[in-house]
Amino acid sequence: MGLKNHRSSAPSVPADVVTGAAGFIGSRLVRRLLAEGQSVVGIDSFDDYYARAAKERNLTEVRRNPNFRLVERDLLGFDPSTVWEPGCRIFHLAAQPGVRGSWGAHFERYLRNNVLVTQRLLEASVRVRPTRFVYASSSSIYGEQPAGPTPETATPNPISPYGVTKLAGEHLVGLYARAHDLSAASLRFFTVYGPGQRPDMAFHRFIEAVRLGKAITLYGDGRQTRDFTFVDDIVDGVLAAGQTEKADGAINLGGGTPAGLSEVLRILGELAGHPVETQSGEAPPGDPRATWADTRRARELLHFQPRVSLADGLRRQWAWQTSADAMAPGG
Ligand code: NAD
Ligand code: UGA
């Protein structure tokens, strides 16, 4: 059975369920839910896409909280509904992320963890009905789009196998919601960064290079732009989506002020106290030229208002990554 929420001021409510709870964004979400007084069941398989130690670090603080229970299981290896209760909210963040690694033999992992797992969770939701199902989708479903902010009504055009699997997940969420009257939303996250960022992502790699006195590798001509979004702003949007049934279908969650990698390098140079060294790497297939979220829907339905500027967010990620905390196992 899932944990109950024992807050004295409120009637007992079922624990929230967070899949991918040990991951970068999932663990930040768990922290916030616990801080709001919720009980949380986190499910994570600690897959080997990156080091277990990093995921353990993400969970160090929440593991001490008696309102948190971690279920270390693969979502395909058991019936997830055995650990949740009717009336809970499901925040489905578990996935195989990463745009550039989704080609070739790796695709099997993407198909399994992004498509099959999502279908399995939706089937379980039909049996043990949650009040909300919030799915972590991705800007990658858009691929290349006309210049300017991309609204949710744009025709999806993924250019990476990863984007295809995240879009398939969205379609599954939409059709199960309609066929079985589930209350669900697909949130399209735009390149998320901040403390805890995955080690394969650009800012993590850039800061690590500077820390070790190495050159930063810029893929292609380095003129890509991204609507970089600070992780706590994403979590604000996810929490808001968990609270209102009015938020259905697809909703963009993006920082709203896209930046080029040159701007990122300029800020990192300021943080380092010297200009950063760069080298060119091959342009990887599947990497969109630009992303930019039109957030009108998120603002209207979720009162979404990103708060953290790129300079401030990068400073926070820099502080985390260069602190002893980020390096020590379990720290
Ligand atoms: P992450 O890899 O840090 O977290 C995902 C977690 O899911 C991992 O801890 C992993 O062990 C777990 N997981 C994977 N397959 C599982 C399975 N079969 N059973 C149980 N657990 C499993 O990734 P993240 O960056 O935190 O991304 C979280 C979600 O947000 C993903 O759905 C991703 O597609 C989406 N997203 C992320 C970004 C970003 O910029 N980080 C942007 C858009 C969308
Ligand atoms: C990120 C996440 O990794 C995906 O999981 C997510 O779904 C996606 O955001 C999204 O928004 O949907 P990406 O935008 O590629 O994907 O994020 P980064 O890894 O931070 O890369 C940003 C840019 O930096 C890309 O153009 C990439 O080519 C570039 N980059 C990355 C480099 O030039 N060098 C590097 O070493 C790494």
Image (spheres, helix red, strand yellow):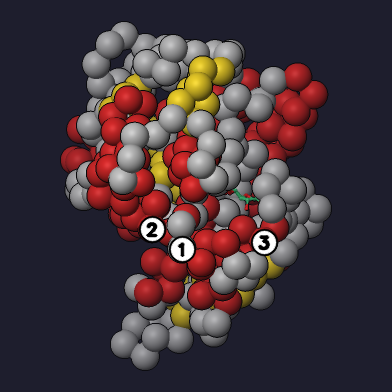
Residue at mark 3: 53
Q: Would you call the spot at circle 3 few (<14 residues within 10 Å), some (14-19), or many (20 or more)? A: some
Relative height, residue 37 to residue 180 (above, below): below
The answer to whether residue 89 is left or right of residue 254 is right
Residue 71, position as x, y percentages in the image: 69, 67
Q: Are marks 2 and 3 in contact (CB under 8 Å)?
A: no
User: Where residue 323 is drawn, which disc sits there?
Assistant: 1
Identify the element where label 3 is drawn.
helix
Identify the element where label 1 is drawn.
loop
Residue occupying image coordinates x 62% and y 70%: 330
Residue at mark 2: 319
Residue 276, position as x, y percentages in the image: 39, 34
Q: Nearer the viewer, mark 2 or mark 3?
A: 2
Residue 207 seen in this snapshot: yes
Q: Are marks 2 and 1 in contact (CB under 8 Å)?
A: yes
Q: Nearer the viewer, residue 55 or 248?
A: 55
Of mark 1 and mark 3, the one earlier in the sequence is: 3
Residue occupying image coordinates x 35% and y 46%: 272
The answer to whether residue 36 is left or right of residue 51 is left
Q: Quadrant of residue 106?
A: top right
The answer to whether residue 285 is left or right of residue 236 is right
Residue 177 seen in this snapshot: no
Residue 241, position as x, y percentages in the image: 35, 50
Residue occupying image coordinates x 31% and y 51%: 315
Identify the element where label 2 is drawn.
helix
Task: Tell me which amino acid carries mark 3.
Answer: Ala
Task: Tell me which amino acid carries mark 1.
Answer: Ser
Q: Are marks 1 and 3 in contact (CB under 8 Å)?
A: no
Give the total of numbered labels.
Answer: 3
